[in-house]
Image (cartoon, helix red, strand yellow):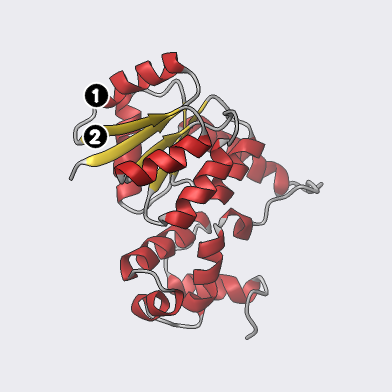
């Protein structure tokens, strides 16, 4: 299936390089370009893009706001942050906005292709350097002197995923959740996979146990 892709960045030179990188990846069709978040949201709707490669720092509307808007309009759209920022703050903001992947701008075609394939399997993708940042953060947070800014894993979930989580814990099926939230069943399945991945859980049973242990539901 062709991946209808929108690329978003306020630097023309980088867009040219990204076009070249994407040309080396099978089944990728660039359907539009944008230099800021506002335009990205508009172009994504007009072109029916199902993939967006999103910069973070842009004028008028940044990548965080644009990603949030895109996910509200179309929860099934896949957004990959493509940025030079490998700091925890930017990673955290983009994850909360709902990105499906996070890669650095020095990535090559093979890694970007891997990102597409990983996300298509319902998993979150991040560059190795980003995993290192998250691991260091987790290590620091679990040290004896805990950081005051320790991130609760629940905070990694998008607003929609936070709506789906308690319904999963209640034992509702994907079809029942879809009916209650007025979304497609496939969207619920995607949310379920993302929730389990972000919380590092294997199945719904583990999710129920996690919810009990963390006070999300009463026993």
Q: Mark 1: which secondary structure?
A: helix
Q: Is residue 94 above or below residue 153?
A: above
Number of residues whose C-alpha sits closer than 10 Å to that of mark 1, classed few (under 14), some (14–19) or many (20 or more): some
Percent x, y for residue 81? 48, 36
Q: Mark 2: which secondary structure?
A: strand
Kindly identify the residue that appears in the image at 61 percent across and 77 percent down.
212
Q: Is residue 98 above or below residue 161?
A: above
Closer to us: 150 or 69: 69
Q: Can see residue 37?
A: yes
Given contact means CB atoms under 8 Å apart, are the residues at marks 2 and 1 in contact?
Answer: yes
Residue matched to label 1: 23
Residue matched to label 2: 28
Closer to us: 31 or 191: 31
Kindly identify the residue that appears in the image at 50 percent across and 77 percent down.
167
Q: Is residue 96 left or right of residue 119?
A: right
> Quarter of the image holding residue 41?
top left
Kindly identify the residue that appears in the image at 64 percent across and 45 percent down.
138
* Residue furthest bottom as drawn: 219
């Amino acid at each position: 299936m062709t991946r209808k892709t929108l690329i978003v960045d306020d630097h023309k030179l980088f867009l040219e390089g990204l076009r070249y990188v994407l040309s080396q990846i099978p089944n990728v069709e660039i359907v539009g370009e944008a230099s800021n978040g506002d335009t990205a949201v508009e172009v994504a709707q007009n072109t029916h893009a199902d993939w967006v490669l999103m910069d973070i720092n842009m004028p008028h509307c940044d990548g965080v706001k644009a990603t949030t808007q895109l996910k509200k309009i179309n929860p099934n759209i896949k957004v990959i942050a493509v940025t030079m920022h490998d700091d925890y703050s930017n990673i955290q903001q983009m994850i909360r906005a709902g990105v499906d992947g996070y890669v650095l701008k020095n990535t090559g075609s093979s890694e970007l292709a891997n990102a597409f394939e990983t996300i298509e399997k319902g998993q979150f993708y991040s560059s190795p350097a980003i995993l290192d940042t998250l691991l260091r953060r987790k290590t620091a947070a679990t040290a004896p002197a805990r950081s005051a800014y320790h991130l609760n894993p629940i905070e990694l979930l998008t607003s929609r995923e936070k709506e789906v989580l308690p319904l999963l814990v209640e034992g509702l099926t994907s079809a029942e959740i879809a009916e209650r939230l007025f979304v497609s069943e496939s969207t619920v399945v995607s949310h379920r996979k993302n929730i389990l991945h972000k919380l590092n859980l294997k199945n719904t049973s583990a999710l129920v146990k996690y919810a009990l242990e963390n006070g999300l539901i009463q026993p």
